[in-house]
C-alpha cells in the first residue's frame, strides 16, 4: 500500500483548564514515530468517565493533570507510518488498530508477566501525561496497539477498548458460571450496558441490572432478566430494602457475583449485601473520594465466605477476545457520535449521570 500523505498539523482537543469541565480544540504538530512506534490516523475516540475524572483532577491520589493535556484512551484508526525497529511487529501501513487506556506497558515486570497489565509498575496511560486519543494523529507502541477485526465498524470498536475490556476482564475475575446470577450496578452506563450484554449473551449468566429508572429500556434490551430502579428504594435504611429485593430476584439466596460499574460509594456499600454465600464483588468503577465501603466488615465475609476483588482493564489477549465478541455481533455498544467541538458539553452530560451508553467522537 502506498504511504498516505501525512499533514504537518492536526486538530486535537486539550484540557485547557484542568480542575474544571472545560476543553478546547487546538492545532498541534503531527508527531513523528520514534523507535518501536507507529503513527495512527485516528478516526474515532470513545469518551469515558475516567477522562472526566482526569480532566477535573477528581482522583485525589493522582498528580493533577497538566494544562494542554490531550485526553482520551479509546482511539481507533489506521497506521500511516512505521517507526524504526517495527519491522518484526507484523504491522503494516493501512492496518486498523486501537489505542487503549494503557498506551503501553513494560512487559518485563512481574504483573505484566502474570498477564495483569493493569498493575504494570511502569505503564504509560493514554490521556494522562501521555498524549491521548482526542486528536487526529497519535503515536502508539507497535507491541501494544490492538488490531481491530475487519467486521467491526470503527465507531463501535472504540468503546470496546476500555469499557468493553474492563467489564470483560471483571466478569472473568468474578468466576461466575453459566446459569448463575450476576448483579451489574450501573447497568445502563457506558461500562454497564456492555457488561450486561457480555454476561447475558456472551457468557450465559442471568443478569440483574441496577440503575436509574430512565435507563431501564437500555438495560433490558441489553439482556438483563430483571431491572432494579434505584430511585424506588429508600436511601436511609442501610440498603435493607433494595438488598432484600435483589436477593429475592436471585432465587432467594442472592447473587453469585456483583460487578460494580458505578463510581459511587453507595453502590459499593450495597454490593456485599446482594451476595450469596461464596459470592464475589468485583470493583470496577472508581469513586472520586476515598470513603471506605460501609458494609465491608470482617464478620460479613466470615459469615458469607464471600470475596471482594478489583480489576483494572485487561491484557492484549483479553482485548482481542472482547473485540471478537463485538465483531460477531454478540455485543453491540449503544453509542452516540459527536464532533470534537462538543466535548465540553458531553462531559457536562457525563457529570449529570443521566447519559445512556457511550459517546464516541468523530475526529474528522
Image (tube, grey):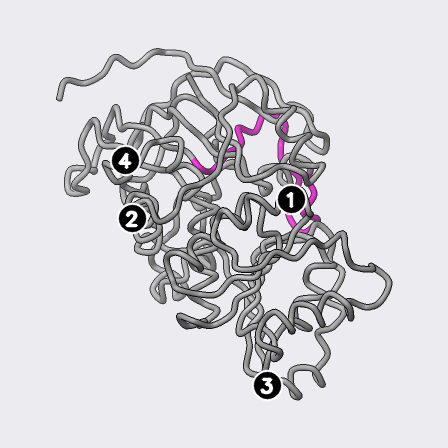
Residue 267: percent from left, percent from top: 69, 59
Which of these two is toward me, 166 or 40? 166
Residue 201: percent from left, percent from top: 39, 56
In the rendered structure, which disc, 1 or 4, sits on the residue that comes first in sequence? 4
Q: In front of the other: label 3 or label 4? A: 3
Residue 70 is a magenta residue? yes
Q: Are marks 3 and 4 in contact (CB under 8 Å)?
A: no
In the rendered structure, which disc, 3 or 4, sits on the residue that comes first in sequence? 4
Q: Label 3: which residue?
A: 305
Considering the image in quadrants, where does the N terminus appear?
top left
In the rendered structure, which disc, 1 or 2, sits on the residue that comes first in sequence? 1
Q: Magenta span: helix, strand or loop, mainly?
A: loop
Per the rendered image, the range of residues in magenta is: 57-74
Which of these two is toward me, 297 or 271? 271
Query: Callout 1: few (<14), some (14-19), or many (20+) C-alpha neighbours within 10 Å?
Result: few
User: Which disc is residue 63 wearing?
Assistant: 1
Q: Label 2: which residue?
A: 324
Q: Are marks 1 and 4 in contact (CB under 8 Å)?
A: no
Kindly state the secondary structure of the residue where label 3 is placed. Answer: loop
User: Which disc is residue 300 wearing?
Assistant: none
Kindly state the secondary structure of the residue where label 4 is placed. Answer: loop
Q: In front of the other: label 1 or label 2? A: 2
Residue 97 is at least partly visible in this image? yes
Q: Are marks 4 and 2 in contact (CB under 8 Å)?
A: no
Q: Please tell me which residue is depicted at 59% across the width and 79% down the height of the picture.
A: 276
Query: Callout 4: few (<14), some (14-19), or many (20+) C-alpha neighbours within 10 Å?
Result: few
User: Which disc is residue 35 wearing?
Assistant: 4
Q: CA distance from mark 2 to mark 3?
A: 35 Å
Residue 309: percent from left, percent from top: 55, 69
Amino acid at each position: 500500500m502506498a504511504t498516505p500523505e501525512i499533514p504537518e498539523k492536526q486538530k486535537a482537543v486539550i484540557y485547557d483548564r484542568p480542575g474544571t469541565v472545560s476543553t478546547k480544540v487546538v492545532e498541534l504538530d503531527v508527531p513523528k514515530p520514534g523507535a518501536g512506534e507507529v503513527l495512527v490516523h485516528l478516526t474515532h475516540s470513545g469518551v469515558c468517565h475516567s477522562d472526566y475524572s482526569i480532566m477535573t483532577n477528581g482522583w485525589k491520589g493522582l498528580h493533577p493533570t497538566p494544562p494542554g493535556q490531550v485526553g482520551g484512551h479509546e482511539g481507533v484508526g489506521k497506521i500511516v507510518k512505521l517507526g524504526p525497529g517495527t519491522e518484526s511487529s507484523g504491522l503494516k501501513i493501512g492496518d486498523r488498530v486501537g489505542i487503549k487506556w494503557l498506551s503501553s506497558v513494560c512487559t518485563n515486570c512481574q504483573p505484566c508477566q502474570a498477564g495483569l497489565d493493569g498493575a504494570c509498575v511502569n505503564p504509560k496511560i493514554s490521556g494522562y501525561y501521555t498524549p491521548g486519543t482526542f486528536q487526529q494523529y497519535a503515536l502508539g507502541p507497535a507491541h501494544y496497539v490492538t488490531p481491530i477485526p475487519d467486521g467491526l465498524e470503527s465507531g463501535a470498536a472504540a468503546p470496546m477498548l476500555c469499557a468493553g475490556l474492563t467489564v470483560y476482564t471483571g466478569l472473568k475475575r468474578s468466576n461466575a458460571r453459566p446459569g448463575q446470577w450476576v448483579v451489574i450496578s450501573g447497568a445502563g452506563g457506558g461500562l454497564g450496558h456492555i457488561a450486561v450484554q457480555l454476561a447475558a449473551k456472551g457468557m450465559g449468566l442471568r443478569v440483574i441490572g441496577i440503575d436509574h429508572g430512565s435507563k431501564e429500556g437500555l438495560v433490558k434490551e441489553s439482556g438483563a432478566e430483571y431491572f432494579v430502579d434505584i430511585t424506588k428504594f429508600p436511601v436511609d435504611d442501610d440498603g435493607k430494602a433494595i438488598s432484600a429485593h435483589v436477593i429475592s430476584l436471585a432465587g432467594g439466596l442472592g447473587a453469585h457475583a456483583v460487578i460494580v460499574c458505578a463510581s459511587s460509594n453507595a453502590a459499593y456499600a450495597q454490593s456485599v449485601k446482594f451476595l450469596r454465600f461464596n459470592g464475589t464483588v468485583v470493583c470496577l468503577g472508581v469513586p472520586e473520594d476515598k470513603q471506605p465501603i460501609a458494609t465491608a466488615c470482617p464478620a460479613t465475609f466470615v459469615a458469607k465466605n464471600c470475596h471482594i476483588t478489583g480489576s483494572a482493564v485487561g491484557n492484549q489477549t483479553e482485548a482481542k477476545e472482547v473485540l471478537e465478541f463485538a465483531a460477531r455481533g454478540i455485543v453491540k455498544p449503544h453509542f452516540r457520535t459527536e464532533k470534537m467541538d462538543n466535548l465540553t458539553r458531553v462531559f457536562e452530560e457525563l457529570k449529570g449521570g443521566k447519559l445512556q451508553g457511550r459517546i464516541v467522537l468523530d475526529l474528522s
